[in-house]
Image (cartoon, grey):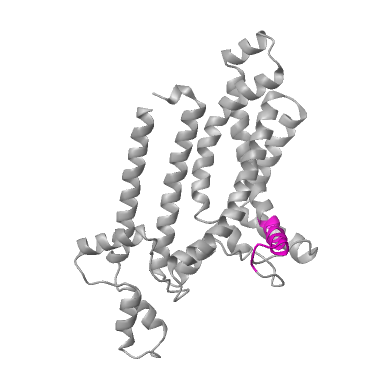
Amino acid sequence: MSGLLRRMGLYAIAAWFALTLNFLLPRMMPGDPAQALFARFQGRLEPAALEALTVTLGVSTAPLGEQYLTYLGQLVRGELGISLVYFPSPVSEVIAGGLGWTLFLAGGALVVAFTLGSALGALAAWRRGGWLDTIAPPLLSFLGAFPYFWLAMAAVWLLGFQLGWFPVRHAYGPEVNPGFTLAFAASAVRHALLPGATMVLASLGGWVLTMRNAMMGVLDDEPIRFAQARGLPPARVFFHYGVRNALLPSLTSFGMAFGFVLSGALLTEIVFAYPGQGYLLLQAVRGQDYPLLQGLFLTITLAVLAANALVDVVVVLLDPRTRG
């Protein structure tokens, strides 16, 4: 457990460093958000409005140390400033809106791809040389080798525009109102099916190969042979001695991938005009929305650290050898 506590300490230091870097970067850039927003109105605002914008956006001329303490206090309260692109909406509300859609689409696709890919990889290794082991890994790797944006655009053109089986933009239809209703849930799932399926198809081959290779190594270990020699049921040998040990490398990769899910599936959200974190990031860059960029950077960094910390805890629970 001491090793796990040391890693948690390193994650805490990394989080503090990310918070501090997130504080310093915008203040090292020329200009300030108030001037950028004032210039966007192209002379339609009176010069006196600049002072009001400065107060609204929280631009401060106080010493850097005082600004840092104020910044930490605002983070504790969940205050990330005002978005310029979505003015006057707070950055926290803008990010919360995109975060839900990203978790629904990219998070759901990641869970499906990881679960299905790990299952296929484990079965392919268990029945090595069979039809699944012969067909699935090369076929899925071939599909995953295509550029993702090509797969997405081909799916949009064929299944969306030509056949009309799926909607090709936004997260739900204009005929429904957002809320906890069956009609809204059905519309959201229907809009997520096509982009989610392309994401699963593009990443499935990697999970299959990772699990298959790990499983092949585990099946050659002494514990597997000893369990088989004792006459244990094949299902128990497969799950308890095979899958449980072979899954550990994939869990680490899953934790990293899930952390980066919060950065948004940028290409997916652009092709399908899906309003997630990636789409927000694109809008923030186009509109030079520094407060929103700052909030997104902080969200992504902390999510990656939290996901890795959670994976370390899970690995320690599953593998006693890592409890040193």
User: Relative to 279, does residue 44 appear above or below in the rendering?
Assistant: below
Query: Does residue 155 appear left or right of residue 317 in this picture?
Result: right
Which residue, as the protein is rendered here, is positioned at the far right?
163
Q: Which residues are magenta?
A: 178-195
- Is 179 covered by the magenta stretch? yes
Query: Does residue 294 appear left or right of residue 240 in this picture?
Result: left
User: Relative to 156, does residue 218 appear above or below in the rendering?
Assistant: above
Which residue, as the protein is rendered here, is positioned at the far top?
230
User: Relative to 176, does residue 257 appear above or below in the rendering?
Assistant: above
Query: Does residue 296 appear left or right of residue 169 in this picture?
Result: left
**Residue at 35% over, 76% down:** 56
Q: Quadrant of the C terminus?
A: top left
Q: Position of residue 20 (x, y in %)?
A: 30, 55
Image mark count: 0
Q: In the rendered image, is residue 278 in sight?
A: no
**Which picture quadrant has residue 156?**
bottom right
User: Relative to 18, does residue 81 appear above or below in the rendering?
Assistant: below
Q: Nearer the viewer, residue 126 or 305?
A: 305
**Residue at 31% over, 73% down:** 32
Q: Quadrant of the N terminus?
A: top left
Q: Position of residue 40 (x, y in %)?
A: 41, 82
The main secondary structure of the magenta stretch is helix
Q: In the rendered image, is residue 324 in sight?
A: yes
Q: Nearer the viewer, residue 102 or 313?
A: 313
**Residue at 62% over, 57% down:** 149
**Which picture quadrant has residue 74?**
bottom left
